[in-house]
Image (cartoon, helix red, strand yellow):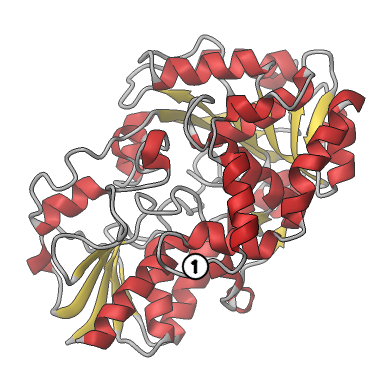
Amino acid sequence: MLDAVVVGAGPNGLTAAVELARRGFSVALFEAKSTVGGGARTEELTLPGFRHDPCSAAHPLGINSPAFRALPLDRYGLEWQHAELPMAHPFLDGTAAVLSRSVAETAASFGPRDAGAYRRLVEPFLAHWDTLVRDFMSLPLTALPRDPVTLARFGLAGLPPATWLLRRFKDERAKALFAGLVAHVIAPLDGLATGAVGLVFALAAHARGWPVPRGGSQAISDALASYLRDLGGAVHTDYEIKRLDDLPPARAYVFDTSPTALARIAGFGDHYAHYRYGPSVFKIDYALDGPVPWTAPEARAAGTVQIGASQAEISTALRAASREGRAPDRPFLITVQPSVADPTRAPEGKHVFWAYGHVPNGWTGDLTDAMERQLERFAPGFRDRVLARAVAGPAELAAHNANYVGGDIACGAASGLQLLLRPRLSLFPYHTPHPAVFICSSATPPGPGVHGMSGHNAAKAVWRRLRQT
């Protein structure tokens, strides 16, 4: 009998399997798709030689993840590539605010009225970042805080809505960039703890940047899978699980799946009936015959570029997708240009480019024209550079990854109490109604992102049980 079976080979499932195998437990992992990766895969979606990431592309949480940093993933081919700037936020006048590795450079890009306020906001936390990120991403009850004072100060700044935190700034440049950071979790700016979301992304950039993996996000998944195999773990692909009886006997079962899928497979009925899924995204991967013709020079040097002319425009777009059930007229866009940092992703002189806007869960329309009109505002002539595009709305995203219910790439709405307490209001979020069944997907704390910490935290709950039985 195996010690543990893991279902789902996304970053969290892979991390959970690795953590258990590192501690001497026998582990087998089962994945429905033909390759491991979940939201961290790389494919030729458009033309030969253009390697795209169907979901996650830039990884500020990955390079800062306490779980990943504790693993020898570099020995298995994971190599982080950095653009000159982690992120840029251009404006219609041809200038841009930036999120740089340097706090001073970032603050200066906001202008003199907000430079001091930004430095006062981030510098106290940056000095304690490694401890803070471990404390922040390990809760609840997976580890005692190492620096409870800094964590409490972070809570005071981050638990209120981002709209409160934005009052610290006077000018649009800082407000728009920070609002865009919050929008990465597709949460309205007035939601609980959204200030913490923006702070975490900013601090992550200052600490270690927003890199891309050399060769694509698949490199993260492949490194985890290779390490797991070297630890004696087994990886089975093309193996869809429809019920627990499809799995071999084990002392524990760990699911990197949505709560909906887990309830169906394990027969938990309506245990997760109150779990909410959030807005979707409409994503386009581009093959370009040259770099994106951004008007702002800073955007040409950045790995990630946020597109939203103002805080108000970003807020309106988020509200449309999250609360009004419609696609925004001017979508807020998150874009990544991996080949700026990693030229191996495209043929010489060509580029891959990735963009998404927010739409309601399950939306069936086409946002391509609205997205490209928005891009043209900040990069005139963009459409002339397009060689090919691969379009994915909510249905296509859900087909690619079953955890994206209705196209929700966060595997659950990151709003209200569910941003912090997911998938249920519980002190033991990785446990389920069955004592031998656990959940480790991004539907559990600390939530969405390629960081493996949900899997790491769940593995702790599993090995405590295994030691008791």
As drawn, which residue projects farthest toward the top? 329
Nearer to me, 457 or 215? 457
Residue 147 x, y percent position in the rendering = 62, 65
| Spot occupied by residue 138 in the image (x, y as percentages of width and height) | 48, 63
Quadrant of image for the N terminus: bottom left
Q: Where residue 410 sits in the image (x, y, percent)? A: 41, 42
**Three-letter amino acid code at disc 1?**
Asp
Q: Quadrant of residue 96?
A: top right
Quadrant (top left/top right/bottom left/bottom right) for the C terminus: bottom left
Name the side, left or right, on which 327 lies relative to 101: left
* Crowd class of label 1 (few under 14; some 14 to 19; many from 20; radius 10 Å): many
Residue drawn 76% across the image and 51% down it: 124
> What residue is disc 1 on?
222
Up-down: is 203 above or below 187?
Answer: below
Q: Nearer the viewer, residue 265 or 125?
A: 125
Q: Nearer the viewer, residue 389 or 356?
A: 356
Q: x and y percent of residue 325 in the render?
A: 35, 15
- Extreme residue in the bottom direction: 24
Q: Which residue is found at the position 47% from the left and 25% from the top?
A: 358
Give residue 372's quadrant in the image. Answer: top right
Q: Is residue 99 visible to the viewer in this orientation of the structure?
A: no
Residue under the point 51% across and 24% down: 190
Q: Is residue 118 left or right of residue 2?
A: right
